[in-house]
Structures are given as structure tokens and as C-alpha cells.
Amino acid sequence: MGKQGWFQVPRSIELTFDLLAERRYREVARGIAARVHRRGTSYGLRRDLTVPFAAPAAKIPLTVRPLRSEDVPILFEGDVSVREAAEMIARRKHLAAEIPQCYVAIDERDGTPCYFQWLMGPKQNAKIKALFGGDWFPVLAPDEALLENAYTPVRYRGNGIMPAAMAQIAEHAAEIGCRYVITFVASDNAASLHGCAKAGFKKYIAREETDTLGLFHSRRFVPLPEVNTAAATPTP
């Protein structure tokens, strides 16, 4: 993806070219302004699947299953907001990378897919590195899985789907021999942080990064102090 010899085109530049190809000029201008010099922090959150946890309920009945080809036109929307345009391109690249496994939540009332997210185990470390870059995520340990690239279509938002679906998808990590499930959320994304907490996740590491023009960047992971209160809510 974007490679020629030893050089890998920065992901931000790839997305800029994709946006230009789609004539999304406003998104390009906003993205360039935001990338002149940027500092950011994301939190790594983790759930221990050995801790009993009662998954929260959404406002609509849900079931979770692996993605099917017929789900793609419904979930991977083309008409999205300016803010979400680059993110949707990134999700399409993730889909094209064919990294297992993408899961979807299904609205049981009519069978419509209403959420998707990838759950990736340690056997996918090389593919994760190739897609996101070598230092975007920690290398997964043999008992760790990564949740990434979640999305809820606009018409389904406000139904509490994210924490309910995320909690159920995380449990599938046990099927690939993983005890821990991790995910990363920007420190200023209060809604997603709250949703992750409701899904049984707690902060355990911070990812601190600086970026200049999308060309020069540094990134480091800083462990956070242990929290006495367990993230998961014990079942009755």
C-alpha cells in the first residue's frame, strides 16, 4: 500500500491524494491546515475477557456476525460528512487489505447491518503494520487482539449501538486464543471513550505523537498508572 522499495508514503498523504481524486477539495484544504504541525494523544484501552462482564443493551435488538459481501454497500457509505470523508477512505483501505476479521452488528428487527468493526489477532501483526504503519499500534502479544475502525451509519446513531456491539465483538477474541482486547481512541473523543468504558474497557496506555506536514512524525507509548477499579462490571 503506497510502497516503492524501502519508502512508504505517509498515510496522511495517501488520503490527501484519494480526496483529490474524488474532488473533495474542501476536505483537502482542511486536512492540510490541520497537519502543518500537530500534537495529539490517544488512549489505549483494554478489556480482560476473564473478568465477567454484562454487555450493555442497545435501544434496538442486536446480533453480531462476520461481515458478508452484501453488507458492504450498506455499511460503507459514499455520502458522508466532510469530517468523516478521510476516515471512510481509511476504512475502505482496511477492507481492501483483507485482514480478518470484520464483524457487523445486525438490527434484528429487519436484518439490516448497522455497525462494523475489525477484531484482529496477533497472527495479523504484519498486515496491521503494513496497513497502519509500523508504530501506530503496539505489536500484539500472543494473548492480545485489537479492535479498530468502528463505524455506525448516520441513520442508526443515537441508539447505543457502539458499546453493545463492541462488547459482543470483543468476546470473539477468545475464539482466537486471546485474553485481552485493546483499542485506541483520541483523548478528545469523549463519546467514544465513554462508549468503550460501557463496553468494559479501561485506559492502560497513552499514545503521544507529533506530526509536521504529514512527513515528519514521532510517536511513543506511555503506560498509565494502574486503576484499582476493574473496567468490567461483574455479572450478578
Image: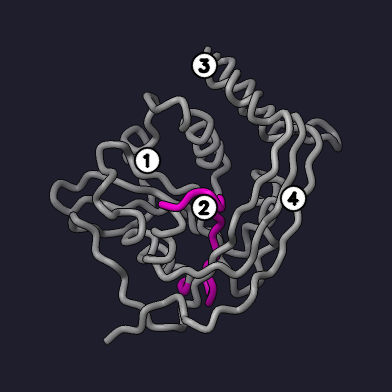
**Depicted 228 relative to depicted 205: above or below:** below
Which residue bears the numbered disc 2? 148
Which residue bears the numbered disc 4? 134
**Element at badge 3?**
loop
Q: Amino acid at mark 1?
A: Ser
**Element at badge 1?**
helix
Q: Work out how far the residue at label 3 is from the one at label 1, CA to CA, in angstroms.
A: 27 Å
Q: Is residue 169 rendered to the left or right of residue 64?
A: right
43 or 63, nearer to the observer:
43
Whether residue 149 appears in magenta in the rendering, the answer is no
Q: Work out how far the residue at label 3 is from the one at label 4, CA to CA, in angstroms.
A: 28 Å
In percent of the image, x 74 and y 39: which residue is there?
211
Quarter of the view holding residue 113: top left
Marks 4/1 in contact by CB < 8 Å: the verdict is no
Question: How crowded is the residue under tag 4: few (<14 C-alpha within 10 Å), some, or many (20+)?
Answer: some
Name the spot of residue 90 as percent of width and height, x first.
55, 36
Query: Of label 3 and label 1, which has the lower sequence position?
Result: 3
Quarter of the view holding residue 5: top right
The quadrant of the rendering that contains the C terminus is bottom left
Name the spot of residue 6 as percent of width and height, x first.
86, 37
Which residue bears the numbered disc 3? 24
- Display colour scheme: one colour
Q: Which mark is residue 69?
A: 1
Query: Of label 3 and label 4, which has the lower sequence position?
Result: 3
Query: Of label 3 and label 2, which has the lower sequence position?
Result: 3
**Total label count?**
4
Q: Is residue 229 rendered to the left or right of residue 20?
A: left
Q: Which residues are magenta?
A: 174-191
Quarter of the view holding residue 132: top right
